[in-house]
Amino acid sequence: MQGRGKTKKTKKAKRSQLSYFLHTDRNEMGLEGLPTWTDIGLAPIGFVLYLVLAFGLMWIFSLFPWFDASQAQETGLDSFITSADAIIAYLRLVVVAPLIEEIIFRGWLYGKLRNCLLARFSDRTSMLISIFVVSLAFGVAHGQWNAGVNMFAMSIVLCGLRETTGTIYSGILMHIIKNGVAFCVIMFT
Protein backbone atom coordinates (compact mmCIF):
# COMPACT_ATOMS: atom_id res chain seq x y z
CA MET A 1 0.00 0.00 0.00
CA GLN A 2 2.86 2.40 0.79
CA GLY A 3 4.48 1.76 -2.58
CA ARG A 4 1.29 2.79 -4.32
CA GLY A 5 1.12 6.04 -2.37
CA LYS A 6 4.71 6.87 -3.26
CA THR A 7 3.97 6.29 -6.94
CA LYS A 8 1.05 8.72 -6.82
CA LYS A 9 3.17 11.31 -5.01
CA THR A 10 6.03 10.82 -7.46
CA LYS A 11 3.73 11.19 -10.47
CA LYS A 12 2.13 14.26 -8.91
CA ALA A 13 5.55 15.79 -8.18
CA LYS A 14 6.74 15.13 -11.76
CA ARG A 15 3.51 16.58 -13.16
CA SER A 16 3.95 19.61 -10.91
CA GLN A 17 7.55 20.10 -12.12
CA LEU A 18 6.48 19.78 -15.74
CA SER A 19 3.62 22.20 -15.15
CA TYR A 20 6.03 24.69 -13.58
CA PHE A 21 8.43 24.39 -16.49
CA LEU A 22 5.72 24.84 -19.12
CA HIS A 23 3.90 27.67 -17.35
CA THR A 24 5.46 31.10 -17.51
CA ASP A 25 4.50 34.74 -17.33
CA ARG A 26 5.39 37.82 -19.39
CA ASN A 27 8.05 38.95 -16.94
CA GLU A 28 9.89 35.60 -16.96
CA MET A 29 9.82 35.65 -20.77
CA GLY A 30 11.19 39.18 -20.97
CA LEU A 31 8.00 40.58 -22.47
CA GLU A 32 7.07 42.91 -19.63
CA GLY A 33 6.11 46.42 -20.67
CA LEU A 34 6.79 47.95 -24.04
CA PRO A 35 10.06 48.47 -25.92
CA THR A 36 12.03 51.51 -24.77
CA TRP A 37 14.49 53.84 -26.48
CA THR A 38 17.21 51.94 -24.65
CA ASP A 39 16.05 48.70 -26.34
CA ILE A 40 16.13 50.44 -29.72
CA GLY A 41 19.55 51.99 -29.11
CA LEU A 42 21.17 48.80 -27.83
CA ALA A 43 20.11 46.72 -30.86
CA PRO A 44 22.62 48.21 -33.35
CA ILE A 45 25.35 48.22 -30.69
CA GLY A 46 24.60 44.54 -30.06
CA PHE A 47 24.76 43.89 -33.81
CA VAL A 48 28.29 45.33 -34.00
CA LEU A 49 29.37 43.29 -30.95
CA TYR A 50 27.88 40.18 -32.57
CA LEU A 51 29.85 40.80 -35.79
CA VAL A 52 33.12 41.14 -33.87
CA LEU A 53 32.45 38.01 -31.79
CA ALA A 54 31.25 35.99 -34.81
CA PHE A 55 34.29 36.90 -36.91
CA GLY A 56 36.58 36.01 -34.01
CA LEU A 57 34.95 32.63 -33.41
CA MET A 58 34.81 31.85 -37.14
CA TRP A 59 38.54 32.66 -37.42
CA ILE A 60 39.35 30.37 -34.48
CA PHE A 61 37.23 27.54 -35.87
CA SER A 62 38.70 27.97 -39.36
CA LEU A 63 42.03 26.83 -37.89
CA PHE A 64 40.54 23.32 -37.65
CA PRO A 65 40.71 21.33 -40.91
CA TRP A 66 37.24 19.79 -40.44
CA PHE A 67 35.53 23.22 -40.24
CA ASP A 68 34.28 24.68 -43.53
CA ALA A 69 33.52 28.36 -42.91
CA SER A 70 32.44 28.90 -46.52
CA GLN A 71 29.71 26.23 -46.53
CA ALA A 72 26.47 27.76 -47.84
CA GLN A 73 23.54 27.68 -45.46
CA GLU A 74 20.28 26.38 -46.90
CA THR A 75 17.76 29.21 -46.48
CA GLY A 76 15.19 28.33 -49.12
CA LEU A 77 15.83 31.65 -50.87
CA ASP A 78 17.44 30.20 -53.98
CA SER A 79 14.73 31.10 -56.47
CA PHE A 80 11.50 33.00 -56.55
CA ILE A 81 8.74 32.73 -59.10
CA THR A 82 7.15 36.09 -58.38
CA SER A 83 7.92 39.21 -56.38
CA ALA A 84 5.21 38.07 -53.96
CA ASP A 85 7.42 35.06 -53.18
CA ALA A 86 10.27 37.42 -52.29
CA ILE A 87 7.98 39.48 -50.04
CA ILE A 88 6.76 36.35 -48.24
CA ALA A 89 10.34 35.12 -47.85
CA TYR A 90 11.34 38.53 -46.47
CA LEU A 91 8.52 38.51 -43.93
CA ARG A 92 9.32 34.92 -42.94
CA LEU A 93 13.07 35.41 -42.55
CA VAL A 94 13.30 39.01 -41.33
CA VAL A 95 10.15 39.42 -39.22
CA VAL A 96 8.57 36.12 -38.19
CA ALA A 97 11.71 34.03 -37.55
CA PRO A 98 13.34 36.60 -35.20
CA LEU A 99 10.11 37.03 -33.24
CA ILE A 100 9.55 33.32 -32.79
CA GLU A 101 13.20 32.47 -32.10
CA GLU A 102 13.59 35.25 -29.54
CA ILE A 103 10.41 34.31 -27.72
CA ILE A 104 11.44 30.65 -27.59
CA PHE A 105 15.19 30.91 -26.92
CA ARG A 106 15.87 34.19 -25.07
CA GLY A 107 12.32 34.49 -23.74
CA TRP A 108 10.99 31.16 -22.54
CA LEU A 109 14.13 28.95 -22.42
CA TYR A 110 16.49 31.57 -21.02
CA GLY A 111 13.94 32.84 -18.49
CA LYS A 112 13.09 29.36 -17.22
CA LEU A 113 16.68 28.14 -17.12
CA ARG A 114 17.89 31.29 -15.40
CA ASN A 115 15.21 31.06 -12.70
CA CYS A 116 15.76 27.32 -12.15
CA LEU A 117 19.53 27.77 -11.81
CA LEU A 118 19.16 30.70 -9.40
CA ALA A 119 17.88 28.25 -6.80
CA ARG A 120 21.19 26.31 -6.95
CA PHE A 121 23.87 28.78 -8.02
CA SER A 122 24.89 32.39 -7.54
CA ASP A 123 23.40 35.07 -9.78
CA ARG A 124 26.54 35.31 -11.94
CA THR A 125 26.99 31.53 -12.27
CA SER A 126 23.35 30.96 -13.18
CA MET A 127 23.59 33.73 -15.78
CA LEU A 128 26.77 32.31 -17.37
CA ILE A 129 25.41 28.74 -17.47
CA SER A 130 22.10 29.96 -18.92
CA ILE A 131 23.85 32.02 -21.61
CA PHE A 132 26.06 29.08 -22.60
CA VAL A 133 23.25 26.48 -22.68
CA VAL A 134 20.81 28.70 -24.59
CA SER A 135 23.50 29.78 -27.05
CA LEU A 136 24.62 26.20 -27.61
CA ALA A 137 21.00 25.12 -28.21
CA PHE A 138 20.47 28.04 -30.61
CA GLY A 139 23.63 27.17 -32.54
CA VAL A 140 22.75 23.48 -32.76
CA ALA A 141 19.23 24.35 -33.93
CA HIS A 142 20.71 26.00 -37.03
CA GLY A 143 22.16 22.70 -38.23
CA GLN A 144 25.53 23.37 -39.85
CA TRP A 145 28.86 23.96 -38.15
CA ASN A 146 29.50 27.37 -39.68
CA ALA A 147 25.94 28.58 -39.08
CA GLY A 148 26.01 27.07 -35.58
CA VAL A 149 29.18 28.92 -34.59
CA ASN A 150 27.78 32.14 -36.04
CA MET A 151 24.44 31.71 -34.22
CA PHE A 152 26.22 30.75 -30.99
CA ALA A 153 28.03 34.11 -31.12
CA MET A 154 24.80 35.93 -31.91
CA SER A 155 22.99 34.23 -29.05
CA ILE A 156 25.66 35.24 -26.55
CA VAL A 157 25.07 38.88 -27.46
CA LEU A 158 21.28 38.43 -27.48
CA CYS A 159 21.39 36.89 -24.00
CA GLY A 160 23.59 39.77 -22.89
CA LEU A 161 20.98 42.21 -24.17
CA ARG A 162 18.32 40.24 -22.28
CA GLU A 163 20.38 40.53 -19.08
CA THR A 164 21.06 44.23 -19.62
CA THR A 165 17.49 45.31 -20.39
CA GLY A 166 15.46 42.60 -18.67
CA THR A 167 13.43 42.15 -21.85
CA ILE A 168 13.83 40.53 -25.26
CA TYR A 169 12.82 43.63 -27.25
CA SER A 170 16.35 44.80 -28.09
CA GLY A 171 17.21 41.18 -29.00
CA ILE A 172 14.24 40.98 -31.36
CA LEU A 173 15.30 44.21 -33.05
CA MET A 174 18.95 43.11 -33.29
CA HIS A 175 17.85 39.76 -34.74
CA ILE A 176 15.68 41.60 -37.30
CA ILE A 177 18.65 43.79 -38.26
CA LYS A 178 20.91 40.73 -38.65
CA ASN A 179 18.40 38.79 -40.72
CA GLY A 180 17.59 41.88 -42.79
CA VAL A 181 21.26 42.34 -43.67
CA ALA A 182 21.56 38.62 -44.47
CA PHE A 183 18.43 38.77 -46.66
CA CYS A 184 19.82 41.74 -48.63
CA VAL A 185 23.18 40.02 -49.09
CA ILE A 186 21.48 36.85 -50.35
CA MET A 187 19.07 38.67 -52.64
CA PHE A 188 21.39 41.27 -54.14
CA THR A 189 24.69 39.43 -54.53
Image (cartoon, rainbow, N blue to C red):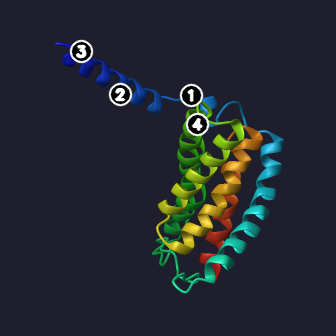
The residue that disc 3 covers is 5
Identify which residue, 171 or 85, lies in the foreground. 171
Disc 1 to disc 2, how far (Cα)?
Answer: 21 Å
Horizontally, residue 73 falls left or right of residue 189, namely left
Going by the numbered disc 2, the residue's amino acid type is Lys
Disc 2 packing (10 Å; few <14; some 14–19; many ≥20): few
Q: Secondary structure at mark 1?
A: loop
Disc 1 to disc 4, how far (Cα)?
Answer: 17 Å
Does the residue at mark 3 contact the one at mark 2 (Cβ under 8 Å)? no
Q: Secondary structure at mark 2?
A: helix
Task: Indicate which label's residue lies in the foreground, 1 or 2.
Answer: 2
The residue that disc 4 covers is 117
Going by the numbered disc 1, the residue's amino acid type is Asp
Q: Is residue 181 above or below residue 157?
A: below
**Residue 30, visible in the rendered structure:** yes
Disc 4 to disc 2, how far (Cα)?
Answer: 18 Å
Disc 3 to disc 1, how far (Cα)?
Answer: 33 Å
Residue 14: assigned label = 2
* Earlier-in-chain disc, 3 versus 1: 3
Q: Indicate the quadrant where residue 103 lies.
A: top right
Q: Secondary structure at mark 4?
A: helix
Percent across and percent down for residue 37 are 83, 42
The residue that disc 1 covers is 25
Does the residue at mark 1 contact the one at mark 4 (Cβ under 8 Å)? no
